Amino acid sequence: MWERGRLPRKPRPSPILVPQPPASPPPPPRLLAFLLPRSLLSLAARAMPSRRPSPLLLLLLALALAFLFLLLSPSAPSASHLSSSLASAAAAVSTPASSPPAPVKIYMYDLPAKFTYGVVRSYMAARARAGAAGAASAIPDDELRYPGHQHSAEWWLFKDLRRRGPRDRPVARVGDPADADLFYVPFFSSLSLVVNPIRPSAAAANASDAAEPAYSDESTQEELLVWLERQPYWRRHQGRDHVFICQDPNALYRVVDRISNAVLLISDFGRLRSEQASLVKDVILPYAHRINSFQGDVGVESRPSLLFFMGNRYRKEGGKVRDTLFQVLENEADVIIKHGAQSRESRRMATRGMHSSKFCLHPAGDTPSACRLFDALVSLCVPVIVSDYIELPFEDVIDYRNISIFVETSKAVQPGFLTSTLRGISSQRILEYQREIKKVKHYFEYEDPNGPVNQIWHQVSSKAPLIKLLINRDKRLVERGTNGTDCSCICSTTKELLRK
C-alpha cells in the first residue's frame, strides 16, 4: 500500500491476488529444492510488465529465499519427521471420539485372612455337625465356596480382582499402591454379620464356651479399622479414595461413621443417614437372586396367576405395609400371596410361583429393597414395586419404568386398586415388559461375565473424578473445628430430592 500523500510517478498494475491451492502433503525437501527455483523464475519472468520489479516478483523472491534458508537450516524438519507428524495426525483423526477411557487403577488390600477366607471358615464352623467344626480350617483357600447368600456380591468382586489374565474391565488391578487411583477393602462384611446362626449348631451348643461365641462381628469390624489406620494410604486422604462393600443394611454398622468418607457399595439407604451415604459418592448394588433363572421365552399362556408374593408378612418400619397388603389381596382370585420364611422349600415354592405368574409383588420390608425384586426379574415376572423410597442399581443404563410397575403405597393399600390396575394391562403390554426384561436381565446375574460385576466396576470407576476433586479441595480448606464428616457438598437427603 502506498503511504498517504505520496503518489506514484506513473500508474502501476494492481497487485495480482493468487488463490491459495488446497493443502496437500509436502514433497521431500530435495524435490522442493530442485523444482522451486525454476518455477519461481519462470513465473517471475512472465509477471514483469516493465523494467521496474513488480510487487509480485519481490514477494515471490522473498518467499523463495525464506524457503531455501529453512532447507539449509540445521533445525529444518526432515522428511521422516514430516512423515511421522502426518502419521500421528492421521492416527489422531482416525481414532474414534468414543474410544473407551483407560481403566481406573485399583489396588486391592492383601488383608489378613481373618477378614476374607477366615470369615467363610467361621461361617462353616458355626454350622458344622458335632465333632466336625475344625474341618473348614483344612480346606485350601482356592477350594472354599462362599455360602449361597443374597449378599454374595462381596465374593464376586473379590474373586474378579484376583483373576489373572487379559481383562476387559473399567478397572485394572495394580500391584503397587503408589500407582492406584482407588483402594478396595475386600472385607466380607455381610457374611461376617451372620456368621453366628440364630440357632447354634450341635457343635457350638456342645462347646464349652457356647455362651461366648468364638466369632464376634463387632470385634472383627474394630480390628479391621485398627489394621487400616496403620496403612499410609488410608491415612493420606482419610480413606476418601477407598471402597468398601457393605451390602447388608447392618453390615459395618459399628464403624460406618469412621468410613463414611469412602465409597460404599450398598443395596439402599434404609439404615444409613444422609451424612453417611449418598447417591453421589456411593454405588447401589443388586442383590444376588436366590431362585433359578427362567430359561423359557416370553409369554403369558404359561403364567396363569395374575400376581405372586411370598415372604414375611410382619416387618418393622416401612415394611408394615405388608400386613395391609395381605389383608387386601389374600382373598383375590388368581392372586397367590403367602407368608413364608427363608428355607429351601420356600425357595422351591417361590421359583414355581414366580415362573407361573405375570406379575410379582415387591413391597417394602425392613428396608426399601430386597432380593425378591431381582428374583422376579430373572423369572421374567414383571415386578410391581410398592416401596416409595427404593433405590435401584445401574439407573444410568436401565430405565426401570420399562421393566417394572411402580405403585404409590397410599394407592396400593386401597381395596381393589392393585388387582384392577393389573387386570387392565393387556397381554401385549406384558410381553413388551418381558422383552425389555430379557434385554437387561444379565445385569442381575452375577455368573454373567458382562453382568453386574462389570457394571459395578463401571459405577466405581465413575466416582474417581469426584474423589480427586474432593481430595484436592480438602488440601486447600482450613481445618474445621468439628469432628463431624464434611458431607455438605456431596450428600442429598430424601426430602431435598422430593422437593426437586
Image (tube, rainbow, N blue to C red):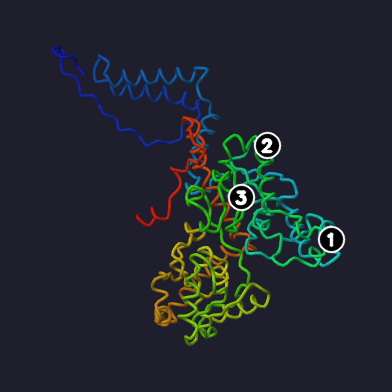
State which quadrant residue 11 falls in: top left
Residue of label 2: 230
Instruction: Give neighbour class at mark 3: few <14, some 14-19, many 20+ (Cα, 10 Å).
Output: few
Q: Amino acid at mark 2?
A: Arg
Cα–Cα span, label 2 and label 1:
33 Å
Residue 373 in percent (x, y) is at 54, 69
- Which dot, 3 or 2, sits closer to the camera? 3
Name above or below for residue 58 compared with residue 108.
Answer: above
- Pick whichever, 67 or 427, lies toward us: 427
Name above or below for residue 215 compared with residue 378.
Answer: above
Identify the mark nearer the N-term, 2 or 1: 1
From the viewer's perspective, is 129 left or right of 265? right
- Pick whichever, 489 or 89, lies toward us: 489
Identify the mark nearer the N-term, 3 or 2: 2
Label 2: state its secondary structure. loop
State which quadrant residue 80 falls in: top right
Residue of label 1: 135
Residue 169 in percent (x, y) is at 60, 51
Residue at 52%, 41% in the rendered image: 467
Q: Are marks 3 and 2 in contact (CB under 8 Å)?
A: no
Cα–Cα span, label 3 and label 2:
19 Å
Q: Are marks 2 and 1 in contact (CB under 8 Å)?
A: no
- Pick whichever, 87 or 300, lies toward us: 300
Residue of label 3: 254
- Which dot, 1 or 3, sits closer to the camera? 3
